[in-house]
Amino acid sequence: MARIAVTGGSGKLGRAVVKDLLDHGNDVVNLDLTPGNDPRARWTKTDLSDFGQAVGVLTAVDDRYDKIDAVVHLAAIPAPGLLPNAATFHNNITVTYNVFAAARTAGIKTIVWASSETVLGLPFDTTPPPYLPADEEYPARPNSSYSLAKHLEEQMAAQFCRWDPTLTMVGLRFSNVMDPDDYKTFPSYDADPHSRSWNAWGYIDARDGAQAVRRALAYGEPGVEVFVIANADTVMSRSSAALAAEVFPGLPVKKELGEHETLLSIDKARRLLGYEPEFTWRS
């Protein structure tokens, strides 16, 4: 059994991550401002913008625990536009630095954190990617203060790993997180293929996002690595090839596409993490 701290464990993706880790035999500590929904996870109310609190909860909390084995960092303002730009940037970059630095202070060697599909250049309906399926191979193209912070978090992780070559830090570029209750809206997207072209019609079922986190925790290779994490299909009923041809005419398509194959490439996550989505809105 590993003791894993999950920051933001009460959020949409966090709830699925906490449940998945518990279901796979781990001891989970939820570090969030609000309590979670799974009584099996110990909750500690934590303001991670305060470095002292970040260090405190990653080292020990009274008689509840005295050691953390790994950190999953999900706590953040979850999207652009929810707060003024500077407030989003300041919160997210500060909290992430505090978590990374506090984990290093605590001697924690494994950190998995939520990066974002936005570093790929979203919204794509403004500036298309250089090719499809979009992947981790081309340079980041942040287009918002939220995305800029996520890009800089990846750069920050690289420097933490340079300072300590024994660290394993894995950034997961999650697509748009969905719960099963969200799927009832998906059929409406078919009326206008442009309505979801901003992220190449991608999504991630929170339960598959949790699987990706669990596999990233087991990755074990020192250094920093980033992965696009999406579901294996798109949010649309029409074929992926037809969508790409209609909305992004002339854009290079690097592979022959399956009928509904995701246009946010998960090939790297499949190859290195063993990630394979188990859920789809179609069922």
Image (tube, rainbow, N blue to C red):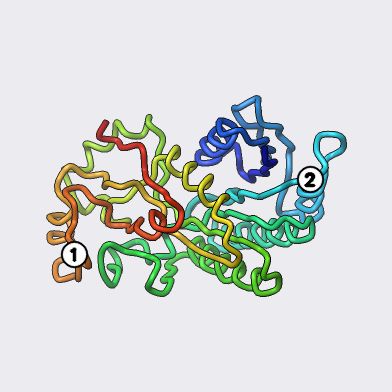
- Comparing labels 1 and 2, the label whose residue is closer to the camera: 2
Q: Looking at the picture, which amino acid does disc 2 mark?
A: Lys
Can you say which quadrant of the picture contains the N terminus? top right
The x, y position of residue 76, in whole percent, is 58, 51
Q: From where the camera sits, is residue 198 visible?
A: no
Q: Residues within 10 Å of mark 2 (few under 14, many from 20)?
A: some
Dot 2 falls on a residue whose secondary structure is loop
> Of 63 and 130, which appears nearest the observer?
63
The x, y position of residue 167, in whole percent, is 66, 63
Which residue is under mark 1? Answer: 248
Residue drawn at x 32%, y 56% as measured from the top left: 199
Count of numbered badges drawn on the protein: 2
- Per the model, the C-alpha gap separating discs 1 and 2 is 50 Å
Q: From where the camera sits, is residue 50 visible?
A: yes
Dot 1 falls on a residue whose secondary structure is loop
The x, y position of residue 232, in whole percent, is 30, 47
- Residue 126 shown left or right of residue 18 in the figure: left
Residue 43 falls in which quadrant of the image? Answer: top right
User: Which is nearer the N-term, disc 1 or disc 2?
Assistant: 2
> Of 68 and 123, which appears nearest the observer?
68
Which mark, by number, is residue 267? none
Which residue is under mark 2? Answer: 67
- Residue 120 shown left or right of residue 105 in the figure: left
Residue drawn at x 18%, y 64% as measured from the top left: 248
Marks 1 & 2, CB-CB < 8 Å contact: no
> Of 265 and 91, which appears nearest the observer?
265
Can you say which quadrant of the picture contains the C terminus? top left
